Amino acid sequence: MAVALSLPSPPASAHRRRPSPGHHPPRFPRAALIEARPVSASDTDVGGGRGQYAIQLAAEMQTPAAISSRPPAPLSVIPKDRAEDMQAEARAMARAANATVYDPQLLAAKYAAQPLKALSRTLEIFTALGTFALKLVADQRRGQLDQRKRQRAAELTKTFTRLGPTFVKIGQGLSTRPDICPPEYLEELSELQDALPTFPNEEAFACIERELGTPLESIYSVISADPIAAASLGQVYKAQLKYSGQVVAVKVQRPGIEEAIGLDFYLLRGLGFLINKYVDIITSDVVALIDEFAKRVYQELNYVQEGQNARRFKKFYADKEYVFVPDIYWDYTGAKVLTMDWVNGVKLSEQETIEKQGLKLLDLVNIGVQCSLRQLLEYGFFHADPHPGNLLATPEGKLAFIDFGMMSETPEDARSAIIGHVVHMVNRDYDAMARDYYALDFLTPDVDVSPIVPALRNFFDDALNSTVSELNFKTIVDGLGNVLYQYPFNVPAYYALILRSLTVLEGLALYADPNFKVLAASYPYFAKRLLTDPNPYLRDALIELLFKDGRFSVQVE
Ligand SMILES: Nc1ncnc2c1ncn2[C@@H]1O[C@H](COP(=O)(O)OP(=O)(O)OP(=O)(O)O)[C@@H](O)[C@H]1O
């Protein structure tokens, strides 16, 4: 067990100097003695390995002799409040030890034994989605498909809401996929973000008490009588912590949600299996896609994991005064309850309210673009659900992030490869672009990329008539998507999420300024990385950018 001590400790440089007689060395802040134990992901630094061990601070290090010979101490010293926080996090993890994980075999065994339940839900889903599909067929027959798009999109949104959390999650996913849905559907489905039906407060409060093992009034001095927002998996209350007076947001999970989504994923997986077997035009492995999606949704159900994601994310931006990430209160967090700082902010989708406060939406979007690029291409750990409801403008003009349930990681090699790919695109070097697909892990080395080169040339020579920075990101994504679609590409999930996160920001910016260009806003970031990063891949990319066909290719106007 970790023991908190209040030992006076020497300053970081003390081991190099002998203290002069009568002179007491300046002291560290109170330190804690931590037993060696695996450090959680949130304790590690950027790219730091999990499973490292926190090192014990030996009490003997307090002797003057030891002071002169000891190794540098700061790495091993953990301030008392940090130590207490780590213990609180460990307690929260213990509370969440039984959180459900996605296990398709277990679900199959469970629901195969409940055929009536499975049948009744199948009927419910088929009736709802079948009725919707019939309306579309009727619209098409009457030639009213375009005319009725908005109405049908609103109906689909209602249908997903009625069908419950799994379908709300599917609808949310679709709402950020301009490559799959027309704009009317994107707009209507984005309503699924947080105006969802609530569940009774008594159930929510009982859940908090059960999860945290203590009465509500011993945790919060005040808690809102009703939820402030209801989202797909939970609802959020505003409260004040009894011990510190801190205003917090308390997210409470919907009761019985594992049961509801478990049955749906069992049924969807069955459908995926039939599609894989009988529908030849769909070449992707639908079961694998469903499994991937289900795994993510289940991860979102463990709020301790979400808290750890928030902490890791917060660490990246700790020194950035223009970004706010709510802190997590571990003692009031478990698998189904998450207590974090309340964010006093306005959603980025509410441009008018933002501008009334004297803030500029475009400034905030710019912060968002820079943050996204750093998350994606530097830290490799990114917010994979940056819909407008999860990005808030604070009254001080900071960009606040919330909802860390869905995060994704970009492998290190892929980060450099993406930057290289952008350089090759700007240079219109289609051979190099095609070769990048190996480095990006889209193609195995045995696939011949030569037929891809003309396809890339066809699209980009047309699209890049003007300079790349003048193109909409979405145009490029669509163009690349078309090329990818025609060849045996296997696009990793993180890549689709990267595209999605930047298209969402571009979508937001276009509301404020129809001429906003994400790529132009990204140029300074790319330039800085290329000029300063010692990674050999990026060094080569810089040389390729500066010298084309052996000639210096930068034009000074
Ligand atoms: N820290 C916070 N401060 C203020 N409001 C918050 C905070 N966290 C959440 N909210 C409000 O609650 C809503 C739902 O929260 P959140 O998005 O985290 O829930 P979720 O169930 O993960 O939602 P989603 O369906 O988007 O996955 C937010 O859109 C926001 O309005």
Image: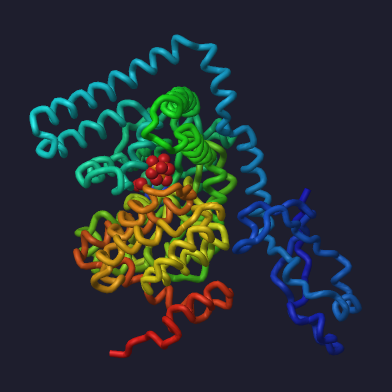
Q: 442 or 52, which is in the foreground?
A: 442
Q: Is residue 21 visible?
A: yes
At horizontal 88% and vertical 78% (from top left) the residue drawn is 69
At horizontal 30% and vertical 39% (from top left) the residue drawn is 192
- Farthest top residue in view: 116
Q: 2 or 171, which is in the foreground?
A: 171
Q: Position of residue 298 (x, y in %)?
A: 51, 36
Q: How is the image coloured?
A: rainbow
Specify whether 446 is left or right of 453.
Answer: right
Specify whether 469 is left or right of 386.
Answer: left
At horizontal 51% and vertical 63% (from top left) the residue drawn is 415
Q: Position of residue 91 (x, y in %)?
A: 66, 43
Q: Is residue 217 visible?
A: no
Does residue 53 sit above or below 421 in this rendering?
A: above
Q: Position of residue 198 (x, y in %)?
A: 34, 32
Q: Position of residue 527 (x, y in %)?
A: 43, 78
Q: Can you say which quadrant of the picture contains the C terminus?
A: bottom left
